[in-house]
Image (cartoon, rainbow, N blue to C red):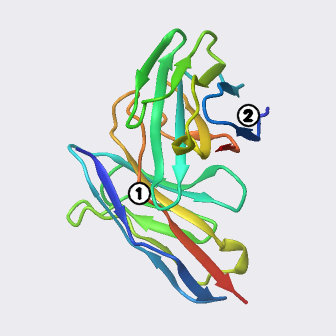
Amino acid sequence: NAGVTQTPKFRVLKTGQSMTLLCAQDMNHEYMYWYRQDPGMGLRLIHYSVGEGTTAKGEVPDGYNVSRLKKQNFLLGLESAAPSQTSVYFCASKTGTGGHEQFFGPGTRLTVL
Amino acid sequence: GNSVTQMEGPVTLSEEAFLTINCTYTATGYPSLFWYVQYPGEGLQLLLKATKADDKGSNKGFEATYRKETTSFHLEKGSVQVSDSAVYFCALSRNSGNTPLVFGKGTRLSVIA
């Protein structure tokens, strides 16, 4: 049982390049979330999904897109990376039946030059 | 809206000292409250939680009591160890379905031998 995994662990991009971050969970969780963590800012929610085929905007969605084509996967895309998107990105998932605990992945450190 | 305010760090303590990290919240209704911990280079993991007023969450020697009258959920530990060095996040979730977590900005704790 791997829990929540994220790919890749590290990435360096040039301004304007695109990339996709993959989050996978094997707990059959309904809800999945993407956060970014910046110094002094805590975690801020980018987008989230309440089930396969559905997504919603969080607190800081601009510059990002997401897709949830399969229940176990939640993809975060950057179409045209900017230096302001340099951050550590965390994915999390949560069961849809009563529990409130979110389970987090290990994070992806992204640097945009 | 919902928000969490926690004391700013960093906090530096000697081993075996008493720890308090303050957390207060603003929320409508009766949220669930959480403390997450992030060890260096890792994702967040749940430390403890409380789902209703006067509940006490506890784990690994840490405790926090849900105080509705003061809208607080302060984290305490009687005797910290070097291995407790980490960033601690207070968070809340409204007790309804898919509501995402709202995090405080985090408090970095360093324990020195």
Badge 1 density bin: few <14, some 14–19, many ≥20, Cα 10 Å = many
**Image height check: is B104 above or below A27?**
below
- Give the residue displayed 40% in from the left and 32% down from the top: A58
Q: Amino acid at mark 1?
A: Gly
Residue B59 locus on image (x, y percent): 59, 63
Mark 1, chain letter? B
Check if mark 1 and mark 2 are on a common chain: no
Q: Which residue is mark 2?
A: A5
* Left or right: B84, with B2 as reference point: right
Viewer-nearest residue: A94 or A58: A58
Towards the viewer: B8 or A60: A60
Q: Position of residue B26 (x, y in %)?
A: 24, 54
- Dot 2: chain letter: A
- Asked whether residue A66 appears in the rendered view, the answer is yes
- Crowding around mark 2 (Cα neighbors within 10 Å: few <14, some 14 to 19, many 20+) is many
Task: Establish if B69 lies above or below B33.
Answer: below
The x, y position of residue A41, in whole percent, is 45, 56
What's the distance in space between the residues labelled 1 and 2, CA to CA? 24 Å
Residue under pointer 1 = B104
Image quadrant holding the N terminus of chain B, namely top left
Q: Quadrant of the C terminus of chain B?
A: bottom right
Q: Quadrant of residue B101?
A: top left
Q: Is residue B78 visible?
A: no
Left/right placement of residue B38 relative to residue A54 reads right
* Residue at 59% over, 87% down: B13
To which quarter of the image does residue A67 belong?
Answer: top right
Q: Position of residue A30 (x, y in %)?
A: 54, 21
B42 with respect to A79 (left or right): right
Which element is circle 1 on? loop
